[in-house]
């Protein structure tokens, strides 16, 4: 029995970053031999526009909006075809808010990709909230893509991944190593030990361990976590970075020279989970490259 591959899904709103998200997602779909699904969420089809107290949208306005959406989806198809003419591309317009539609679509997607900013300032705020909703409640990994800097050569840059030894962290490592292997680049594995629980730090202090020995312990932890991945991906170079400080700061430092950052949706333990949530949000707002929140 043949199975249908899960698609890589892109939210389309006509913004420059949405079209960059299509370009990025098309390359990823080609790498993974996966179909590409382009979806526009049409809030006007629900019969009202937000902040108008349920006032119906005039039909001429609806018709103009439909023409814009048709153009956006056509342009998105052309961008995808330019990346890979053989790529299977599906388009859809679904009634509802972007948040509702993309959360629903995430249940059958391999990866959801959205732009970091929407069309216009108001749309940008909405898209920001959609990205946050997807990272918190989506049912698959989420990638947030920015417009690339002019003259940048991302293919030569590494993939940065946050490592904390948790189950979700292992999912982040899977995505990071897959991405690095498909792009013939290396991994920058970053482990921050700022978020160790207070009790653990106190136990170590009582044992008269120095901070350097704590660092050595964390380096051993990182090496142990990466050992299996090195064996599975022997052709992917791995550089390890262990530091004391907030995970977001250490990851952002490496993101300046990366083509992608990958983090897990939740971290090690309850407290770490909260910190990693704030870390992922910081990266989504400030990382200069695409960010994947894996789950």
Image (spheres, grey):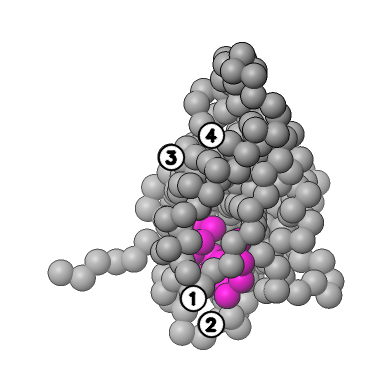
Q: Is residue 190 magenta?
A: no
Residue 281 image-quadrant placement? top right
Q: Which residue is mark 1?
A: 30
Mark 4 to mark 3 CA distance (whole Å):
8 Å
For image coordinates 60% across by 83% down, the residue present is 82
* Residue reaching furthest to the right: 150
Q: Residues within 10 Å of mark 3 (few under 14, many from 20)?
A: some
For image coordinates 46% across by 66% down, the residue present is 233
Residue 84's tag is: 2
Provide the residue span drawn in magenta: 172-187
Q: Which residue is mark 3?
A: 167
Mark 1 to mark 4 CA distance (whole Å):
30 Å
Lower position in the chain sequence, tag 2 or tag 3: 2
The answer to whether any part of residue 30 appears in the image is yes
Mark 1 to mark 2 CA distance (whole Å):
7 Å
The answer to which of 119 and 55 lies nearer the viewer is 119
x and y, in percent, of residue 18 in the image: 66, 60
The answer to which of 106 and 235 lies nearer the viewer is 235
Mark 1 to mark 3 CA distance (whole Å):
28 Å
Q: Are marks 1 and 4 in contact (CB under 8 Å)?
A: no
């Amino acid at each position: 029995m043949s199975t249908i591959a899960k698609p890589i899904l892109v939210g389309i709103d006509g913004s420059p970053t949405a079209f960059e998200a299509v370009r990025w997602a098309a390359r990823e779909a080609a790498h993974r031999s996966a179909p590409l699904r382009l979806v526009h969420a049409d809030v006007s089809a629900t019969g009202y526009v937000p902040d108008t107290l349920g006032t119906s949208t005039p039909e001429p306005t609806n018709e103009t909006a439909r023409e814009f959406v048709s153009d956006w989806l056509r342009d998105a198809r052309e961008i995808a075809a330019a990346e890979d003419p053989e790529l299977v591309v599906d388009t859809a317009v679904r009634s509802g808010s972007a948040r509702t539609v993309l959360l629903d679509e995430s249940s059958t997607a391999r990866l959801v990709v959205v732009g970091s900013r929407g069309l216009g300032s108001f749309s940008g705020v909405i898209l920001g909230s959609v990205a946050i909703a997807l990272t918190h409640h989506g049912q698959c990994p989420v990638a947030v893509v920015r417009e690339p800097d002019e003259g940048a050569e991302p293919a030569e840059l590494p993939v940065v991944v946050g490592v904390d030894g948790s189950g979700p962290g292992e999912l982040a490592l899977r995505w990071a190593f897959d991405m690095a292997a498909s792009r013939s680049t290396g991994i920058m594995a970053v482990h921050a030990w700022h978020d160790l629980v207070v009790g653990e730090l106190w136990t170590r202090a009582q044992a008269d361990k120095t901070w350097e020995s704590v660092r050595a312990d964390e380096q051993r932890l990182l090496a142990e976590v990466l050992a299996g991945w090195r064996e599975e991906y022997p052709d992917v170079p791995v550089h390890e970075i262990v530091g004391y400080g907030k995970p977001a700061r250490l990851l952002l430092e490496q993101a300046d020279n990366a083509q992608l950052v990958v983090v897990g949706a939740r971290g090690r333990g309850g407290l770490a989970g909260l910190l990693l949530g704030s870390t992922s949000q910081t990266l989504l707002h400030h990382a200069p490259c695409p960010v994947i929140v894996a789950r």
